[in-house]
Amino acid sequence: MFQPFKEYLEEQIFNRFDLQSRPIPAGLESNISDRGKNRATIQSWCYQCSQLRKIRYTYIDAGETAQVFNSVIYPSHNYDIPLLGIDFLSFGKKKILVVLDFQPLFRDRSYLGKYIEPMGEIRDKYNELAQNLEMKFYDANQYFSKYLLFAKTDAETVVNRLFPAYQEYIQLYWEILEAAQPLTNPDDIQRIVKAQKDYDQYSAERDPAHGLFSSYFGPEWAERFLYEFLFEDASALAVASTR
Ligand code: BLA
């Protein structure tokens, strides 16, 4: 279902950047859960280049039961620009949830004006994908922008509307990256290191996929996948007792 989205992202990053593979901890690159007819596979890829320190994406294929494409692009620490966040989920073909955003690291007006306002024009073309749904796991005011695409939708809309919207958001993301002035002051760079780390901590603690990973691949694998790969700058100790 989301394979063309993965291929588009790959085509973009391979052609635009001088990519190097970024290692994925042993055992976390892929996994297969075989419970009779409910076979599920998960596979992840990770790259880096001078402007982007971590480009990761994951595909879960459980046939009709579940298809997921999830990705986060982390800019290098000398760029203060938002992270690109993608979370497209389809369960049993009927329940399709899509989220796409430039995830802001800061919320002051000048930051939002510079990096989030430009999304508005695209967002306004895709009203049906911006449904103002309530968030149950996350806080919409942390690491989400007001122009995020967030919708419960159907397969036809995924093809006809989400795909062009996705391409436009990604193109705008490259434009913002290209226009961004690299930071040189060590204190400014440290501020980004901390903000990206806080994002990982927040995301690891709230990730609604923990249960999904755990049910397919077991709780130990799920915990490792979250803290050693997806959000590797988060510390697991802080939440060990809450799960
Ligand atoms: C929701 N994301 C979800 C849900 C799952 C995942 C299972 C709950 C769906 C439901 O309501 O039943 C799945 N999350 C994943 C997977 C990975 C993951 C498979 O991290 C990793 C491989 N989530 C992101 C990113 C964004 C994001 C980058 O990982 C930003 C665009 C958003 N996911 C997001 C939001 C929701 C969601 C906003 C709704 C959660 C809520 O209601 O609070």
Image (cartoon, helix red, strand yellow):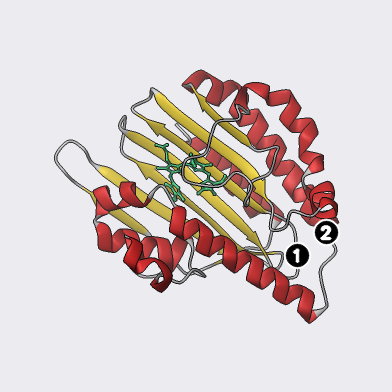
Q: Do the residues labelled 1 and 2 touch (CB within 8 Å)?
A: yes
Q: Which residue is drawn at 39% across and 66% down?
A: 239
Rendered location of residue 144, percent (x, y): 63, 46
Residue drawn at x 42%, y 70% is: 238
Q: Name the residue under label 2.
A: 180
Residue 207 percent coordinates (x, y): 44, 52
The residue closer to the viewer here, 182 or 226, is: 226
**In the rendered structure, which amino acid carries the disc numbered 1?**
Tyr
**In the figure, 121 relative to 21: above or below?**
above
Please tell me whether mark 2 sits on a helix, a strand or a loop.
loop
Q: How crowded is mark 1: few (under 14 residues within 10 Å), some or many (20 or more)?
A: many
Q: Residues within 10 Å of mark 2 (few under 14, many from 20)?
A: some
The C terminus lies in quadrant: bottom left
Quadrant showing the N terminus: top left
Residue 113: image x %, image y %?
A: 84, 47
For the residue marked with disc 2, what is the amino acid?
Ala
Q: Distance between the residues labelled 1 and 2?
A: 7 Å
Q: Please name the residue that numbered disc 1 is placed on.
A: 79
Looking at this rendering, what residue extends furthest in the bottom direction?
A: 186
Residue depicted at 35% across the width and 70% down the height: 26
- Tell me, yes or no, if residue 28 can be seen here: no
Relative depth, front residue between 167 and 92: 92
Left-right relation of 170 to 9: right
Q: Which residue lies furthest to the left in this view?
A: 36
The percent coordinates of residue 6 (x first, y second) are: 53, 43
- Judged from the image, the secondary structure of the residue bearing numbered disc 1 is loop
